[in-house]
Image (spheres, rainbow, N blue to C red):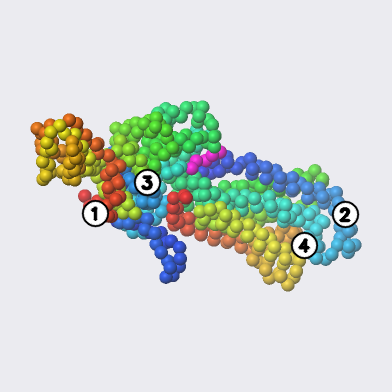
Amino acid sequence: MISGPLLRHTWRAHRVRVVVLALGLAAWGFIMPVVYATFGVQMEAIMESGIVPEVFLRLLGADPFSLSGAVALGAVHPVALGLQLAYPVGFGAAAIAGERQRGTLEVLLSRPISRRSVFMTLLVALAAFAVLTTAGEVVGTVVASILFDVADRLEPASLVFLALNTVVLLVALAAVCLAASASFDRLSGPIAIGLALVIVGYVLEVLGTLWPDAAFLQPYSPFHYLRPLEILGGRAEATDLLVLAAVGIAATAFGLWHFPRRDLAAPT
Amino acid sequence: MAAIETHGLTKHYPAGGRGPDAREIRALDDVGLEVHEGEIFGFLGPNGAGKSTFIRLLLGFIHATAGSAAVLGLDAARDSVEIRRRTGYLPGGIALYDGLTGERHLDYLAELSGSPTVRRAELCDRLELDARTLRRPIRDYSRGMRQKIGIVQALQHDPELAILDEPSEGLDPLMQRAFYEVLDGLRADGRTVFFSSHVLSEVERVCDRVAVVREGRLVAVEDVATLLARRRRRVELRLAGPAPDLRGVAGVSGVVEDDETLTCWLEGDPRAFLAAIAGTPVADLTIEAARLEDAFLELYEAPPAVVAPQAGPT
């Protein structure tokens, strides 16, 4: 089901960018413990003084200037999410539709490789990229925590669970974007679907956080199922993983069913 | 066993509109064809006639609306991966991975095929793709060089059947000749080649048999020699005396006499015509060579007459 040559080709084509993203996320992950170690006490005093509006505190989470709070904030910050989502959404949406648009899918599929194998191989590549970029962020956080002597304030099992939850979220989004990619002849369709999924999902989640009356919208956002503050506070919920896994499995099943049935007419 | 065998192969596409406005494009209609092992078979037709649709059905890129196709004895819909393992395919207007070098591109496609590249060196040699050229990125290649890479990737693993869509497109005349020699080599080795083209001179040069497709329907399947022999040729006689009486001579039609010139059409066996002009004082005689192009144009100018599906139980 997995094509070794295609997997190696995909890795060779993307390894530099993936490593750069992983390093970027490592740097980002490094910053959060540094911020906590350097400014945590002062920031906590500011927060407790009541100067900062309550709505802003809600957005940051209940415990923004503990180490867990800082790491959790870093994990769902738009910068981190932007870096994390570049591959699952960008490459996921472009992987098949891009080859189709350029005409190279024809050359690939003229070899003895099934469309299901193409789909699964690309999904495995995306999952591997997600593991690498997430690992980059975790390594950055752990290294900074050790260097600044605050590592004892992080629970390793919780950090592993957070990484796992992040990877499952990224793979679920990648599966949705890849299924969209396998359904279109042009890039614009799957890119639009991927961006809509991310932007609308993020807006729903933030809106629900800031405005309690809109909280009912949050379960419709994929980002609702990544709750770093709860995870790092020891309140991880397996149902979040299950929901994301179900989305990923449903998207994968659709892609594996639909892609082989599509007519791939001659490129125009 | 036939290399390719189709029965009633049909492909319709939905085209615009819904409900009562829904229409269908009949890309291919009831095509029955048999391509024998070891032959070079030309598939002719102008753009949009259904050539690429036929090829894509054989390779499983699209799914038939009706009918069936077998390639190397395998069902085209069910066994397409195995068919592609034993087949070499050159898509029309091939797109390549621009970021790879020619060599890396060929290696990658060979890895995907999982077969040794037994013909690569010979093909690169014939098509003048030297090691230096192959080390350059494909984005720097001209159209002709890309086509050469396309030909090499299709044939490098010495497939039992080569399916080539417009293979000489973009090649200069010297390279076209080299490519025809490659095809001759494949024929000598007993390989089957199925290729679509609208360059009739190359089809005439390399093919054993041809099929002509028009508006999705097969209108002729013939040996090239038979097709040419059946074709009308224009004859011009410059006379040095009285004109011969050509009325009722087999194969002769459209006789026009001028002062010193007689022109007519000659179809099929010329012996009756030659016997009829024996003894005539002829200053000069011109019989135009039969060309596939004329045969093709005749088939296209005539009202559509569809050949009976050719493939059948044997």
Residue located at (24% from left, 36% from top): B288
Left or right relative to B272: residue B73: right
How far, Cα to Cα, is label 1 from label 3?
27 Å
Q: Secondary structure at mark 3?
A: helix
Viewer-side label of 1, 3: 1
- Looking at the rendered structure, the kind of residue marked 1 is Ala
Residue located at (82% from left, 46% from top): A149
Magenta run includes residue B224? no
How far, Cα to Cα, is label 4 from label 3?
57 Å
Residue under pointer 3: B83
| Location of residue A12 (image quadrant) | top right
Viewer-side label of 2, 3: 3
| Location of residue A44 (image quadrant) | bottom right
Q: Does B219 sit above or below residue B243?
A: below
Q: Secondary structure at mark 2?
A: helix
How far, Cα to Cα, is label 4 from label 2?
20 Å
Disc 4 to disc 3: CB gap under 8 Å: no
Residue located at (75% from left, 69% from top): A211
Magenta run includes residue B97? yes
Question: Foreground: A91 or B50?
Answer: B50
Q: Main secondary structure of the magenta part?
A: loop
Viewer-side label of 4, 2: 4
Region rendered in magenta: B95-99
Q: Residues within 10 Å of mark 2 (few under 14, many from 20)?
A: few
Left or right relative to B73: residue A175: right
Q: Quadrant of the N terminus of chain B?
A: top left
| Location of residue B89 (image quadrant) | top left
Residue under pointer 4: A59
Which mark, by number, is residue A41? Answer: 2
- Looking at the rendered structure, the kind of residue marked 2 is Val
